[in-house]
Image: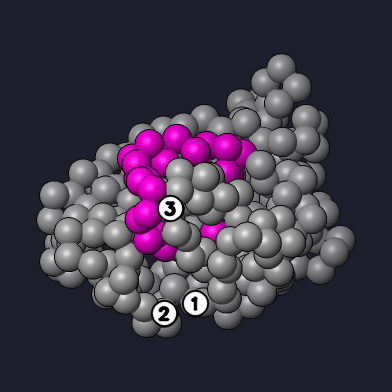
């Protein structure tokens, strides 16, 4: 199952499905670029770049971008999408770069990594003095309704309940502490709810579950997984299916910090 986009031991991302059903990931990520505020000539690391859409946006400001992801399939597609940008398969928990970057940027990737202190240390190493770290990812309470529904559905189909959360969804206090321990200062962090429409109309929740919830369903056989998806849809439809669109209960944490 896909452990994360930026750092993981498995690479089972369905890139075609990701580009077809995951467009909201980079569309919402464009808002985070305002906090990054890239400038011409800057050297910027895009950590957990996926298939490269935001890397291209950063490059359009005149910055020099190195975009990394641990997923071979993601990077392969990113190189096809944007051959003018430098992409590399690098695990965020193992990267040893810098200090050479004016900024490190990450969107919707860090919640896939359960070793935040290691990643933050590597980000610190990559940055030049006064370099900035700008990131947005899942925060405390993210997709809680979906996770709880999956757990109840697993029980109903006779599967064991998944123990623990496969993702890293911190509070502001938790993540600020990680940043401070590494030496970051001028930390601006906030946690906010963001109701997020899923692509695909009536199939939006099913597409999302197949693409992003594999850590909670990857052990299920095909019949079990199909039944779980159906049960989740049935349970959440009254609250999360509105006017023909599935709406995810996203909670995001957004941070900007200076080395």
First in sequence: mark 1 vs mark 3: 3
Numbered disc 1: secondary structure: loop
Which color scheme does this rendered protein use?
one colour
Q: Nearer the viewer, mark 1 or mark 3?
A: 3
Let me know if residue 22 appears in the view: yes
Residue occupying image coordinates x 67% and y 46%: 22
Q: Residue at x 37, y 54 (%)?
A: 41
The magenta segment is 24-49
Residue beneath the point at 41% across and 79% down: 95
Quarter of the image holding residue 131? bottom left
Disc sitting over residue 91 in the figure? 1
Check disc 1: other Cα within 10 Å, few if <14, some if 14-19, many if 20+. Answer: many
Mark 2 residue crowding within 10 angstroms, few (<14) / some (14–19) / many (20+): some
| Mark 2 vs 3, N-terminal side | 3
Q: CA distance from mark 2 to mark 3?
A: 21 Å
Circles 1 and 3, Cβ within 8 Å, touching? The answer is: no
Residue 228 x/y as whole percent: 75, 52
Of residues 117 and 210, the one nearer the viewer is 117
Residue that lies at the very extreme toward the right in this rendered image: 223
In the rendering, which numbered label is found on residue 95? 2
Where residue 246 appears, as percent x and y from the top left, is 68, 31
Which residue position is annotated with label 3?
Answer: 63
Q: Secondary structure at mark 2?
A: loop
């Amino acid at each position: 199952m896909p452990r994360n986009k930026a750092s993981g031991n498995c690479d089972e991302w369905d890139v075609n499905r990701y580009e077809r059903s995951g467009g909201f990931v980079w569309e919402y990520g464009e808002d985070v670029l305002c906090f990054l505020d890239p400038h011409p000539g800057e050297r910027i690391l895009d950590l957990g770049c996926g298939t490269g859409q935001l890397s291209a946006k950063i490059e359009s400001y005149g910055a020099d971008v190195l975009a990394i992801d641990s997923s071979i399939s993601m990077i392969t597609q990113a190189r096809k999408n944007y051959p003018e940008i430098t992409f590399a398969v690098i695990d965020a928990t193992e990267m040893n770069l810098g200090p050479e970057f004016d900024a490190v940027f990450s969107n919707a990737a860090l919640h896939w990594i359960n070793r935040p202190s290691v990643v933050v240390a590597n980000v610190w190493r990559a940055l030049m003095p006064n370099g900035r770290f700008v990131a947005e990812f899942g925060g405390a309470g993210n997709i809680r309704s979906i996770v709880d529904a999956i757990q109840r559905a697993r029980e109903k189909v006779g599967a064991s309940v998944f123990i623990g959360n496969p993702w890293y969804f911190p509070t502001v206090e938790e993540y600020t502490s990680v940043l401070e321990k590494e030496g970051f200062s001028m930390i601006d962090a906030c946690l906010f709810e963001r109701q997020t429409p899923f692509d695909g109309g009536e199939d939006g929740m099913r597409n999302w579950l197949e693409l992003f919830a594999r850590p909670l369903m990857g052990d299920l056989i095909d019949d079990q997984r199909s039944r779980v998806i159906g049960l989740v849809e049935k349970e959440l439809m009254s609250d999360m299916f509105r006017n023909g669109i599935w709406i995810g209960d996203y909670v995001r944490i957004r941070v900007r910090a200076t080395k």
